[in-house]
Image: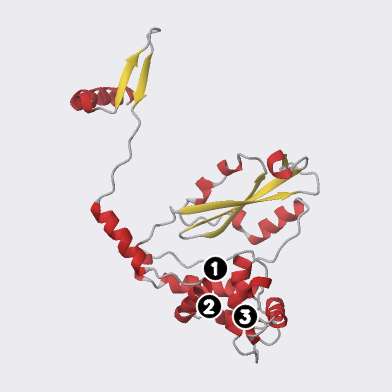
């Protein structure tokens, strides 16, 4: 097979002639060296420039809170942030308070920039109350479920992949106990040791997790697992995650993983 591949490449080089992007150079020691010419940037076609301008005109510049309110009008996801007590509230403009808190948390700007004493829904006392009693792990999970369900009804989503599109991210943690998985990494843990909790999602599965040593090469542990269609391995199990966290001396946080919609078959 390898010999056939080399012969095929030689034939194609002869066909390409001077336009070939690669060449084979025989060095003084008799060994062959493969030289590959650097690829140059291709010019943008007029159709791409037209499409970019068209898309920019279709996306108006609006504030982030306005975007959340518009998505709420499609999905009703803000209704999931119910009160801790009986699930009912007499507060007016509760959605305004929730949007302010979501923007505050998502942008990591704190509560002060979204406080407005002149608007009842944005006073400090109101936001503190809503943050304490309405923004919880279960309400966030319910809101995410509403968004996922609404997205699943968009026609184009039915043509998306079969679990082969994945995203992986990691959370680095310094561990307070001795464990076999902890590893030194001065860049992230100074003089201590740590681990990394890798979490992955693909277009069918959410919440694939794995605990790995907290070294700069931890990104090599997981991508293959995340891309497996329909993967719901033991590492994604809630009890398995809890055992891992307890073994490493870390506090177990309430599980707020997003629910997963069943895979949609393409046409």
Between the residue at mark 3 and the residue at mark 1, the CA separation in whole angstroms equals 25 Å
Q: Residue furthest front?
A: 118
Spatial CA span between label 2 and label 1: 14 Å
Q: Earlier in the sequence, mark 3 or mark 1?
A: 3
In the picture, measured across the screen, residue 256 lies left or right of residue 24, that is right
For label 2, the crowd category at 10 Å Cα-Cα, with few meaning under 14, some 14 to 19 and many 20 or more, is many
Counting residues from the N terminus, which is met first, the one under dot 2 or under dot 3?
A: 2
Given residues 182 and 106, the one toward you in this image is 106
Q: Measuring 20% from the left and 27% from the top, which residue is drawn there? A: 16
State the mark number for residue 97.
3
In the picture shown, does residue 6 fall above or below 221?
above
Return the disc, 2 or 1, that comes first in the chain's sequence: 2
Q: Is residue 95 left or right of residue 2?
A: right
Q: Residue furthest left?
A: 15
The percent position of residue 238, horizontal first and vertical second, equals 65, 61
For residue 155, what is the image quadrant?
bottom left
Residue placed under numbered mark 1 in the picture: 259
Q: Nearer the viewer, mark 3 or mark 1?
A: 3
| Quadrant that contains the C terminus | bottom left
Residue pictured at 51% horizontal, 51% vertical? 226
Instruction: Name the residue beneath numbered marker 2.
Output: 77
Residue under the image location 56 percent in, 67 percent down: 258
Residue lying furthest bottom = 90
């Amino acid at each position: 097979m390898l010999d056939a591949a080399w012969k095929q490449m030689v034939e194609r080089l002869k066909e390409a002639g001077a336009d070939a992007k690669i060449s084979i150079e025989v060095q003084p020691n008799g060994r062959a060296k493969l030289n590959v010419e650097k690829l140059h940037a291709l010019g943008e076609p007029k159709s791409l420039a037209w499409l970019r301008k068209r898309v920019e005109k279709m996306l108006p510049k609006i504030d982030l809170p306005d975007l959340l309110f518009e998505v709420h009008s499609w999905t009703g996801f803000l209704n999931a942030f119910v009160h801790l007590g009986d699930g009912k509230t007499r507060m007016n403009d509760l959605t305004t308070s929730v949007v302010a808190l979501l923007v505050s948390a998502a942008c990591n700007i704190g509560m002060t920039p979204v406080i407005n004493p002149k608007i009842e829904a944005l006073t400090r006392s109101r936001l503190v109350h809503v943050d304490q009693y309405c923004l919880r792990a279960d309400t966030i999970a319910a809101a995410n479920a509403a968004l996922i369900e609404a997205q699943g009804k968009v026609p184009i989503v039915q043509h998306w992949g079969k679990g082969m599109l994945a995203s992986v991210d990691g959370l680095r943690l310094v561990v307070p106990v001795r464990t076999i998985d902890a590893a030194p990494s001065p860049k992230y843990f100074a003089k201590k040791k740590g681990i990394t909790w890798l979490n992955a999602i693909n277009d069918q599965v959410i919440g694939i997790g794995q605990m790995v040593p907290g070294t700069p090469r931890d990104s090599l542990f997981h991508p293959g697992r995340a891309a497996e269609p329909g993967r719901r391995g033991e590492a994604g199990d809630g009890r398995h995650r809890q055992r891992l966290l307890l073994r490493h001396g870390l506090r177990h946080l309430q599980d707020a993983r997003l629910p997963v919609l069943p895979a949609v078959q393409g046409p």
